[in-house]
Image (spheres, rainbow, N blue to C red):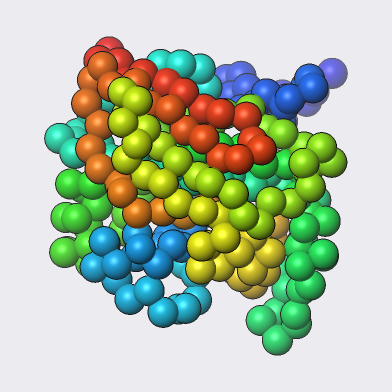
Amino acid sequence: MTPQSEKFVFAPPAPVGVPIIGGGQFPVRRIFCVGRNYAAHTREMGGNPDREPPFFFTKPSDAIILGDHVPYPVATHSLHHEVELVIALDQAAHAISPAQAISPAQANSLIYGYAVGVDLTRRDLQDEAKSMRRPWDMAKGFDHSAPIGPIIPAAQIGHPTHGAITLAINSQVKQAGDLADLIWPVPDIIAALSHLVALAPGDLIYTGTPDGVGPLAVGDHVTCHIDGIPPLAFTITPPAR
Ligand code: MN
């Protein structure tokens, strides 16, 4: 019997799980996201596409939303789509010093699998945060801000380094890039993030979006594709009550 002093005062939240192709669930621990990671998108956001070190922000794990309905969020009039390759880690990596190189093979050995995700963004709040030099959290880490498709194990597909990444709204292509155009490829992202935190099983990394980001409206049907990875599709529904 648990001593009274160790009891939770209410039931802890259930772990967030993402379905895995072939069965089972991937338990989500944390969600990291890479800022600008495709040169053309960096330019469209007014940044310098030279190879500056990658930077990261986070979303809470319960920002994950599965299934084919995503509610339009509160507190914005400018919900933007950003289609991204998502990495799912099942191995830990203690903070590796920047002086220590991590080989692509070592970095890839931390990866369980891959998924297609969308980094939904309240662009108006992000623009305001940028102009006031405030954090991005409420622009990026809101409820239902991390749609994700099923995870496919790397054991089945290997580690993709190129391939089309696209997002369409109502069958009209809005974003079309190639994984080969990542400024920081997957092993480099893992190495850079491991310099900042101890990576852990269950961590997801959204790896950045190609150019063509833009607004979503209630009723829009969004279809996302990355070569070799299960697709993601959803419809934007009226705000959740
Ligand atoms: Mn993004």
Residue at 69 percent across and 64 percent down: it is 187
Residue furthest bottom in the image? 99
Query: In this rendering, is residue 70 above or below 99?
Result: above
Q: Position of residue 26 (x, y in %)?
A: 71, 31
Query: Is residue 141 visible from the viewing direction of this image?
Result: no
Count of numbered circles on the image: 0
Along the line of sight, which residue is nearer the eye, 10 or 206?
A: 206
Name the image quarter holding residue 128.
bottom left
Query: Is residue 171 visible from the viewing direction of this image?
Result: yes
Asked if residue 129 lies left or right of residue 177, the reply is: left
Residue at 35 percent across and 59 percent down: it is 41
Q: Which quarter of the figure is the C terminus placed in?
A: top left
Asked if residue 210 lies left or right of residue 26, the reply is: left
Q: Position of residue 49 (x, y in %)?
A: 38, 74
Query: In this rendering, is residue 48 above or below 203?
Result: below
Q: Which quarter of the figure is the N terminus placed in?
A: top right
Query: In this rendering, is residue 215 above or below 162?
Result: above
Q: Position of residue 236 (x, y in %)?
A: 32, 21
Name the image quarter holding residue 185.
bottom right
Along the line of sight, which residue is nearer the eye, 141 or 4?
A: 141
Residue at 44 percent across and 62 percent down: it is 38
Asked if residue 211 lies left or right of residue 204, the reply is: left
Asked if residue 143 lies left or right of residue 80, the reply is: right
Along the line of sight, which residue is nearer the eye, 27 or 81?
A: 81
Q: Position of residue 10 (x, y in %)?
A: 57, 20
Residue at 56 percent across and 29 percent down: it is 231
